[in-house]
């Protein structure tokens, strides 16, 4: 087996989004999966920072966490899957799940992140509907009529 892997080909061949951002959150890699999920072309994405896919209400928390990760070279999410809302080009809200990895320069200083992202909007909506239905079944409304 040939161990020389073309990373750009790899990123383009998988269905999940692969997004790489530098230490200033500027997008430096945006694959076809990211275009499919978020609606932005590679050209549109490469002209932006990650802020354009982060909903306004999460932006401050995101920016704080990103800055801290760049300072410390660590992420508190490590190997866990993070589930958060995101913003599509058309303004709609997505539910995404992703893992994030830190990138480092030759001096071992954090210089970016890579995220592998999956759209879970449909799964999230189905799960919410199931939870609602389960709650209704466990707590049916009181339909007994009282007579005077």
Image: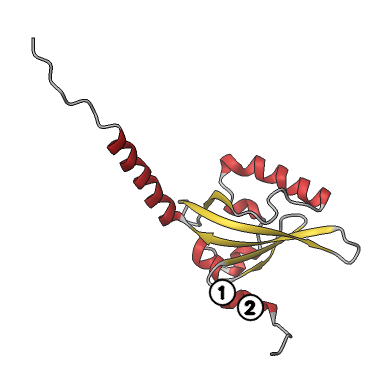
Asked if marks 2 and 1 touch (Cβ < 8 Å), the reply is yes
Q: How is the image coloured?
A: secondary structure
Disc 1 crowd, CA 10 A, few/some/many (<14, 14-19, 20+): few
Looking at the image, can residue 66 be seen? yes
Residue sitting at 35 percent across and 47 percent down? Answer: 130
Extreme residue in the right direction: 107
Disc 2 crowd, CA 10 A, few/some/many (<14, 14-19, 20+): few
Residue located beneath label 2 in the image: 10
Q: CA distance from mark 2 to mark 1?
A: 7 Å
Extreme residue in the top direction: 148
Q: Secondary structure at mark 2?
A: helix
Determine which of the numbered discs, if any, sits on residue 45 in the image.
none
Q: Secondary structure at mark 1?
A: loop
Extreme residue in the bottom direction: 1
Q: Quadrant of residue 4?
A: bottom right
Query: How far across and down, in percent of the image, does residue 27 sit?
Result: 68, 62
Query: How far across and down, in percent of the image, does residue 136 sit?
Result: 29, 36
Query: How far across and down, in percent of the image, does residue 145 sit?
Result: 12, 20
Residue located beneath label 1 in the image: 14
Extreme residue in the left direction: 148
Residue 43 as seen in the image, left or right of residue 141? right
Q: Is the C terminus in the top left, top right, bottom left or bottom right quadrant?
A: top left
Q: Is the N terminus in the top left, top right, bottom left or bottom right quadrant?
A: bottom right
Q: Nearer the viewer, residue 41 or 12?
A: 12
Residue 52 as seen in the image, left or right of residue 25? left
Query: How far across and down, in percent of the image, does residue 35 sit?
Result: 54, 67
Tell me: residue 62, above or below residue 31: above
Looking at the image, can residue 38 be seen? no
Q: Nearer the viewer, residue 45 or 125?
A: 125
Q: Nearer the viewer, residue 133 or 123?
A: 133
């Amino acid at each position: 087996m040939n161990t020389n892997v073309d990373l750009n080909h790899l990123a383009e061949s998988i269905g999940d989004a692969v997004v790489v951002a530098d230490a200033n959150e500027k997008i430096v890699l945006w694959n076809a999966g990211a275009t499919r999920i978020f609606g932005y072309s590679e050209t549109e994405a490469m002209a932006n920072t990650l802020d354009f896919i982060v909903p306004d209400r999460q932006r401050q928390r995101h920016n704080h966490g990103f800055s801290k990760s760049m300072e410390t070279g660590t992420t508190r999410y490590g190997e866990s899957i993070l589930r958060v809302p995101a913003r599509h080009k058309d303004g709609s809200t997505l539910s995404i799940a992703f893992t994030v990895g830190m990138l480092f320069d030759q001096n071992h200083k954090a210089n970016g992140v890579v995220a592998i992202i999956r759209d879970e909007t449909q799964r999230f909506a189905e799960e919410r509907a199931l939870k609602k239905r389960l709650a209704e079944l466990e707590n049916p409304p009181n339909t007994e009529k009282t007579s005077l």
